[in-house]
Image (cartoon, rainbow, N blue to C red):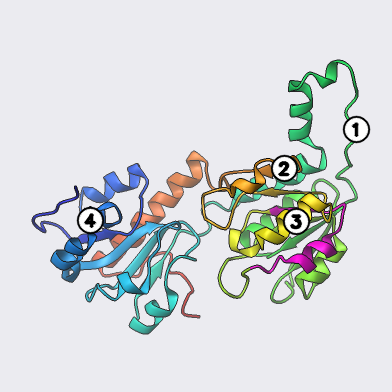
Amino acid sequence: MLEVKTVNKPVLLAAGFLPPDQLSELQTRYDVLEWYKADNPAAILSSFAKYVRCVVGTSHASITATLLNQLPALEQVSIYGAGYDNVDIVTLKKRGIRLTHTPGVNTDDVADLGMAFILATARQVVEADRFVRSGKAQNESMPFSNSLTGSKVGIAGLGTIGYELARRAEIFKVELHYHNRKPRQDVTYTYHKTLLSLAEAVDFLVLCMPGGESTEHCVNTQVLAALGKKGILINIGRGSLVDEEALYEALTSGVIAGAAIDVFKQLGKPTPKFEKLENVLLSPHRGSATFESRAAMGSLFIANIDALYEGVLPPAIAPHLN
């Protein structure tokens, strides 16, 4: 049972799991209330809500209006992760509560994974491994795969990660297309005003877009049909971007050739129905899962929290009020 009897240091309320290294460091100078796993969370709020100036958690933590409105002294929500889809932004705006996160520090690793997915699906790396392990290679030849050279790669969301992915893809002599809210002036890739237009033009559709209401299920039946029966969908952005029912139907009926998915509808939890499909490469949210990225994320996460109590602006304030 979680129990905190006295307040000796500034109080942080953990709305969800925190990585052990970050939790241990925070506990050296803060009283961290692990509210999310308390036997009686209401009692924790009743006793300590007035002391809580900062709520913390990973991108998985659900930080609702109900929780936020029970914390009268709250000034900041700090997320360990770049995404904040599970934070009630409307309530933050209404109350003037600051939101911090950890963007940018995992850019290269996420872009690397996206490029790995392109290569793996183009050259059927996972299928080749299965073919050999099954013993088939002893007696038969595996069907040919497609060359990546000369293929058309479309990036939906040419932000920091999307741009780094494009730079990597250029090396493989592909033709690059992209969709953004507006064209970028610093690239020569072919711009598409709509996601549907991008899907129609490319062989690989790579999702690097943020989540949220404006992009929810933007990859739907129409977009998948436009991608076509030779097309590959790759998602390293957010699970909410994809209508999973439509994707499952497209994969099982041959509307598209395959997919590589690192993020699902339920963040961090792969959707079981895809597990039996051999034309899908599945990954359990590994984009930033390197020692280097996680260390950098941890440092920035803690710097954001410390800044609140030091009376200075945090280094990574989320642009949710723009």
Residue 146, by quadrant, is top right
Q: Is residue 110 above or below residue 184?
A: above
Residue at which label 1 appears: 143
Give how far across and how far down residue 134 sits, in percent. Answer: 76, 22
Considering only order in the chain, which callout, 4 or 3, is on the residue closer to the N terminus? 4
The Cα–Cα distance between marks 2 and 1, rounded to whole angstroms, is 18 Å
Residue 204, by quadrant, is bottom right
Residue at which label 2 appears: 277
Classify mark 3: helix, strand or loop.
helix
The Cα–Cα distance between marks 3 and 2, rounded to whole angstroms, is 11 Å
Most foreground residue, 267 or 59 = 267
Give how far across and how far down residue 174 sits, in percent. Answer: 85, 52
Q: Are marks 3 and 1 in contact (CB under 8 Å)?
A: no
Left or right position of 52 against 58: left
* Residue at 65% across, 67% down: 217
- Residue 238 appears anywhere in the view: no
Residue at which label 3 appears: 249
Most foreground residue, 64 or 157 = 64
The Cα–Cα distance between marks 1 and 4, rounded to whole angstroms, is 56 Å
Residues drawn in magenta? 217-234
Residue sticking out furthest to the left: 6
Considering only order in the chain, which callout, 1 or 2, is on the residue closer to the N terminus? 1
Considering only order in the chain, which callout, 4 or 2, is on the residue closer to the N terminus? 4
Give how far across and how far down residue 226 sits, in percent. Answer: 84, 65
Residue at which label 4 appears: 33
